[in-house]
Image (cartoon, coloured by chain):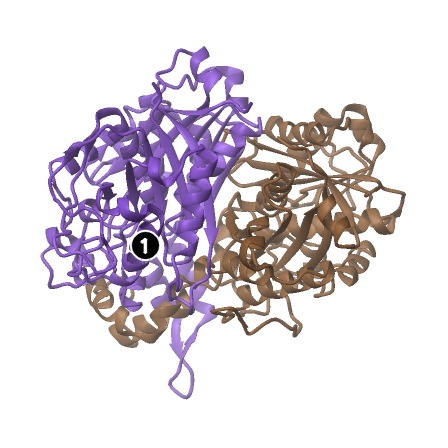
């Protein structure tokens, strides 16, 4: 029989601070960190978002911080470092254990790793010229001069595997390491695939999580150009409205989440506190109906969730709480709600549906791992955050709408993400004992 | 965990040497260098002016499912996957059968953002404005209204893997990103998916288009690239004492991997077998490999263990061999640690001496060439090998391909940040 994979640490860096507890308490209290953005980003739609306010010095108190160099990190890598360090501290992982590193790995999901958009804008402006017809052309001769505004290290920082590269050093990992790219479901894929690494016997301990920042200029412009951003005229605290008819779009947010996954025997051997079991994983891809559109049916989410449930040996009727994407765009929220309805059936109205977006905006690939950390706390405490800003639900959504936190006796949490890109992923977390 | 055999039934590439993988192999085995002066832009005055580019017209789908193939990186991706699937004789799966297929793709970077940003910046700030004193708030306010801004996220190639998933009819899709190890990382992950019984078919590969105005000078600033600008054909010289960095290359390559029983059941031609794979992380530094080659040795050892082999089973090492001072020295040391005395008895060669470094696509392309080396019996040479480096003292198959019956190849791929992957390719014997 396959040995269980257990969760022995949860970590996060969110606009509520370092660690999952700050976020959990804030969400239970119905708080949001969405606020007007400072500096030039205030002129970018929507002009508000939820930022992580932690500084480089906050890394210093984390495990193995002496090996970390915040000056060599992009925002993504910085958030990943905070989340991983937070998880290592929470799990009391003995990272400085010599050959133990051979059996440890790190999977993290990320997206773009280029957060110095201002520098690229100025570089691009520096090298632009016009041809004889007045059309813009790039003046190659200006590039060597313009490139001097960068250091070589900035191109290294830009590489999309850097969150893992730093994490491999931070966590003393000499086992499998990978950065999963792309969609918000990537964080859940990183967790699910890390579980498989342990099951396959390639590692005993895997750090697994995701990171995202949507409050930097490049991402904000991209979303605004695609008409995905929330409306500027909305009160920031009211902007994140998952499954609500008043939602106007994606609220920029950022954060990182990370779990410590261990083979059960490894965790027991070191006397670790076992917080929960990572019981199942599933994924499915259904392409969108048009380039940059969304899928026509919730098939991917339903199949992914059912695969996760099957691997966990339970059925949808056993799920006590679901944590979902809740992007706060009516089209994707509608698709996600249809998937939940198909999955949960008549229980849709009674199973709590927890979303981060109203509290900390869109965190890209971090949404799954942060939600997984929240799920552990929900299973441990029985306390469930309320449905903030969900007072007028869209027609497809038949779930709870109360803004107040509730208490339940929960044994199974399902984290399921429906994404704009069509890749859905789900995990089941089980309370033990 | 099940222990199913993993076989290779299809390969495809669009790379500097061509878009027919068998023809690419023949040119590589003959030691034909393809690196040259960069033509994608005028590199005059650049520290590095050398690249390895796809300079020919090739066929690729214009659309795949809902996706438009609107830049060269996506065309490389879709074109190489199309060729690999055609060689394998596979059409897209549908319905429940999609659950048995996966795509694991190593994606590097697409078009540089400056192509889109520059015109916007000029319109907003005006011709002749000082870029470093211009008001970013004004740029930010206007940029979302500019049509070019729609191209901003092309840099990330986030649709590349989904495009291949549509081509294959796969329900499972994800990316590997482990820098220069990524292509082999995708192949290794594909092997794991099949071996454990999760799926029957995986399209694994990589794509990268780094020959841009930003990344070439950027990586030159890191002293990673060769600056032998007056002699591009001799710039990529792995293991040679005169090496001074790698040559940036572009392209895409894909392999179709299947479980043996699936391939046999449908009567597929089996091209080779994926014997095993190993991963490791140096956990050392961001820029340099661990100088003792410990991480590199670890992944080679793990790959051999995964394949159920010993060092003496290896007939040839297809090296990562970038032509940087650090990599080639550390890799040599690691090969000796992993294979012991046997390391001196077999050819160790670097395909990159012919076509440079295709970064995220490198491992996949060199994996294809490994399969063809086993099938054709000629080990590609390490060209431009003129002056031995005392710290690189193995048989690098210098300058001329070698006829040799080769049953087992250990393929190395090592990335910035200390990511290491080794893959064992072997002759298929049913």
In this picture, residue A142 sits left or right of residue B418: left
Residue B22: quarter of image: bottom right
Q: Quadrant of residue A258?
A: top left
Observer able to see residue A121: yes
- Name the residue located 21 percent from the left edge and 64 percent from the top edge: B135
Indicate the position of residue B131 as horizontal and vertical percent values: 29, 65
Tally the numbered discs.
Answer: 1
User: Which chain letter goes with mark 1?
Assistant: A
Residue A157: x %, y % from top left: 42, 45
User: Is residue A109 shown to the viewer in this render?
Assistant: no
| Chain identifier of the purple chain | A
Who is closer to the viewer here, A309 or A240?
A: A309
Q: Judge whether B340 appears above or below B272 on screen.
A: above
**Nearer to us in this view, A187 or A97:** A187
Residue A20 image offset from top left, x and y in percent:
25, 31
Q: Quadrant of the C terminus of chain A?
A: top left
Chain B is shown in which shade? Answer: brown
What is the secondary structure assignment of the residue under circle 1? Answer: helix
Which residue is depicted at the point 18% across and 46% down? A400
- Image point 30% across, 46% down: which residue? A324
Query: What is the quadrant of residue A147 in the picture?
Result: bottom left
Placement of A370 over or under A327, stated as above or below: above
Q: Quadrant of the N terminus of chain A?
A: top right
Residue that numbered label 1 is attached to: A336
Tell me which residue sits at (30%, 77%) in the image.
Answer: B127
């Amino acid at each position: 029989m396959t040995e269980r994979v257990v969760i022995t640490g949860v970590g996060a860096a969110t606009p509520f601070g370092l660690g999952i507890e700050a976020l959990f308490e804030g969400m239970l209290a119905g708080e949001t960190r969405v606020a007007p953005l400072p500096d030039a980003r205030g002129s970018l739609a929507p002009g508000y978002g939820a930022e992580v306010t932690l500084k480089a010095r906050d890394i210093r108190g984390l495990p193995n911080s002496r090996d970390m160099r915040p000056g060599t990190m992009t925002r993504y890598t910085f958030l990943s470092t905070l989340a991983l360090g937070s998880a290592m501290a929470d799990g009391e992982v003995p990272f400085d254990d010599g050959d133990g590193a051979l059996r440890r790995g790190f999977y993290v999901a990320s997206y773009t790793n280029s957060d110095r958009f201002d520098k690229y804008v100025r570089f691009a402006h520096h090298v632009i010229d016009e041809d004889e017809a007045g059309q813009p052309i790039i003046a190659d001769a200006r590039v060597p001069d313009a490139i001097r505004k960068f250091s070589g290290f900035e191109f290294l920082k830009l590489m999309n595997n850097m969150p893992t590269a730093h994490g491999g050093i931070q966590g003393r990992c000499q086992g499998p390491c990978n950065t999963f790219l792309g969609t918000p479901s990537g964080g859940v894929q990183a967790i699910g695939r890390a579980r498989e690494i342990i099951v396959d016997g390639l590692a005993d301990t895997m750090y697994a999580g995701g990171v995202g920042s949507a409050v930097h200029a490049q991402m904000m412009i991209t979303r605004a150009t695609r008409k995905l951003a929330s409306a500027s005229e909305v009160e920031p605290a009211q902007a994140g409205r998952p499954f609500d008819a008043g939602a106007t779009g994606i609220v920029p947010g950022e954060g990182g989440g990370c779990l410590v996954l261990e083979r059960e025997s490894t965790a027991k051997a070191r006397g670790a506190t076992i917080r929960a079991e990572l019981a199942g994983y599933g994924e499915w891809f259904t392409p969108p109906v048009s380039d940059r559109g969304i899928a026509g049916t919730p098939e991917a989410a339903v199949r992914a969730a059912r695969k996760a449930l099957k691997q966990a040996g339970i059925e949808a009727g056993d799920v006590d709480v679901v944590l979902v994407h809740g992007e706060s765009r009516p089209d994707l929220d509608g698709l996600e709600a249809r998937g939940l309805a198909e999955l949960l059936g008549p229980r849709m109205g009674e199973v709590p549906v927890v979303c981060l977006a109203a509290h900390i905006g869109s965190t890209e690939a971090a949404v799954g791992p942060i939600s997984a950390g929240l799920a552990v706390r929900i299973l441990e405490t029985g306390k469930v955050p309320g449905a903030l800003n969900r007072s007028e639900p869209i027609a497809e959504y038949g779930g709870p709408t109360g803004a107040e936190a509730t208490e339940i006796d929960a044994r199974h949490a399902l984290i399921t993400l429906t994404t704009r890109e069509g890749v859905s992923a789900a995990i089941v977390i089980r309370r033990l004992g | 965990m099940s222990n199913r055999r993993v076989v290779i039934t299809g390969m495809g590439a669009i790379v500097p040497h061509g878009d027919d993988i068998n023809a690419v192999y023949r040119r590589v085995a003959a030691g034909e260098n393809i690196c040259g002066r960069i033509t994608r832009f005028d590199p005059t005055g650049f520290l590095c002016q050398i690249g390895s580019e796809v300079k020919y017209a090739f066929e690729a789908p214009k659309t795949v499912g809902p996706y438009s193939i609107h830049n060269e990186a996506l065309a490389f991706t879709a074109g190489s996957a199309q060729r690999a699937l055609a060689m394998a004789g596979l059409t897209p799966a549908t319905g429940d059968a999609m659950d048995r297929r996966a795509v694991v793709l190593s994606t590097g970077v697409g078009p540089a953002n400056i192509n889109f940003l520059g015109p916007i910046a000029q319109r907003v700030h005006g011709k002749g404005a000082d870029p470093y004193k211009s008001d970013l708030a004004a740029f930010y306010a206007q940029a979302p209204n500019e049509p070019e801004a729609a191209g901003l996220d092309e840099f990330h190639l986030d649709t590349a893997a989904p495009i291949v998933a549509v081509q294959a009819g796969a329900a499972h899709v994800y990316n590997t990103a482990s820098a220069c190890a990524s292509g082999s990382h995708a192949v290794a992950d594909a092997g794991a998916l099949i071996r454990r019984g999760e799926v029957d078919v995986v399209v694994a590969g990589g794509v990268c288009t780094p020959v841009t105005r930003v990344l070439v000078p950027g990586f030159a600033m890191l002293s990673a690239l060769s600056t032998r600008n007056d002699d591009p054909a001799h710039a990529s010289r792995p293991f040679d004492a005169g090496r001074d960095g790698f040559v940036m290359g572009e392209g895409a390559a894909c392999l179709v991997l299947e479980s043996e029983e699936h391939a046999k059941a449908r009567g597929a031609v089996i091209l080779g077998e994926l014997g095993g794979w190993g991963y490791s992380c140096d956990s050392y530094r961001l820029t340099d490999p661990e100088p003792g080659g410990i991480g590199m040795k670890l992944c080679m050892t793990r790959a051999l263990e995964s394949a159920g082999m010993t060092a003496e089973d290896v007939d040839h090492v297809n090296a990562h061999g970038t032509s940087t001072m650090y990599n080639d020295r550390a890799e040599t040391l690691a090969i000796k640690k992993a294979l012991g005395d046997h390391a001196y008895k077999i050819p160790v060669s670097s395909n990159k001496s012919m076509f440079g470094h295709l970064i995220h696509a490198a491992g996949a392309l060199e994996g294809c060439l490994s399969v063809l080396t086993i099938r054709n019996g000629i080990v590609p040479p390490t060209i431009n090998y003129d002056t031995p480096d005392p710290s690189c003292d193995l048989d690098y198959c210098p300058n001329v391909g070698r006829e040799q019956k080769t049953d087992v190849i250990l393929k190395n791929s090592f990335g910035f940040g200390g990511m290491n992957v080794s893959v064992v390719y072997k002759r298929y014997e049913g």
